[in-house]
């Protein structure tokens, strides 16, 4: 959200017509209704974060309830957080591939690792 506001302040671009209402009507408002490559990049990065962080939070909660060692849980959470921060910077700067892809893969692998531990714990009950 913060990056979207910064992009608007710098680029003055809206995608939705209703967002331009505070800038007047007609042609005056239409000049703000356009797509901008930088704004779209921020939007795609934000959507990617949502697609990865929301499942991580759910699986992370189940993982925490499965009774892992504290050091292992902290390692999972820290690696995921670092990978997502790196992915966000790689998306916004943009850094050349495979930087963004590798950071995504690391975060995804952490989520899969926690999901495996949850499934393993549930199936052994």
Image (spheres, rainbow, N blue to C red):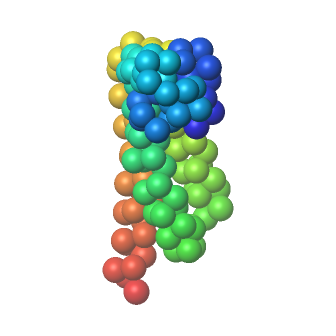
Taking the spot 53% from the left edge, 15% from the top edge, the residue there is: 11
Along the horizontal axis of the image, is 54 left or right of 120? right
Taking the spot 37% from the left edge, 72% from the top edge, the residue there is: 120
In the rendered image, the residue lying farthest to the bottom is 125
Along the horizontal axis of the image, is 43 left or right of 85? left
Q: From where the camera sits, is residue 46 visible? A: no
Relative depth, front residue between 81 and 15: 15
Q: Position of residue 39 (x, y in %)?
A: 46, 23
- In what quadrant of the picture does the N terminus appear? top right
Relative depth, front residue between 112 and 34: 34
Along the horizontal axis of the image, is 38 left or right of 11? left
Taking the spot 37% from the left edge, 54% from the top edge, the residue there is: 112
Using the rendered view, name the quadrant where residue 100 is placed. top left
Vertical relation: 60 (above or below) 9 = below
Taking the spot 34% from the left edge, 80% from the top edge, the residue there is: 123
Using the rendered view, name the quadrant where residue 16 is placed. top left
Along the horizontal axis of the image, is 10 left or right of 112? right
- In what quadrant of the picture does the C terminus appear? bottom left
Vertical relation: 119 (above or below) 115 = below
């Amino acid at each position: 959200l913060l990056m979207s506001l910064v992009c608007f302040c710098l680029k003055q671009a809206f995608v939705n017509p209703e967002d331009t209402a505070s800038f007047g009507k007609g042609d005056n408002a239409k000049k703000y209704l356009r797509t901008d490559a930088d704004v779209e990049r921020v939007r795609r990065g934000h959507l990617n974060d949502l697609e990865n962080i929301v499942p991580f939070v759910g699986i992370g909660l189940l993982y925490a309830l499965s009774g892992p060692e504290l050091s292992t849980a902290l390692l999972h959470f820290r690696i995921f957080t670092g990978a997502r921060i790196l992915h966000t910077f790689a998306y916004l700067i943009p850094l050349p591939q495979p930087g963004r892809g590798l950071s995504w893969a690391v975060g995804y692998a952490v989520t899969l690792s926690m999901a495996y531990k949850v499934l393993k714990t549930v199936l052994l009950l």
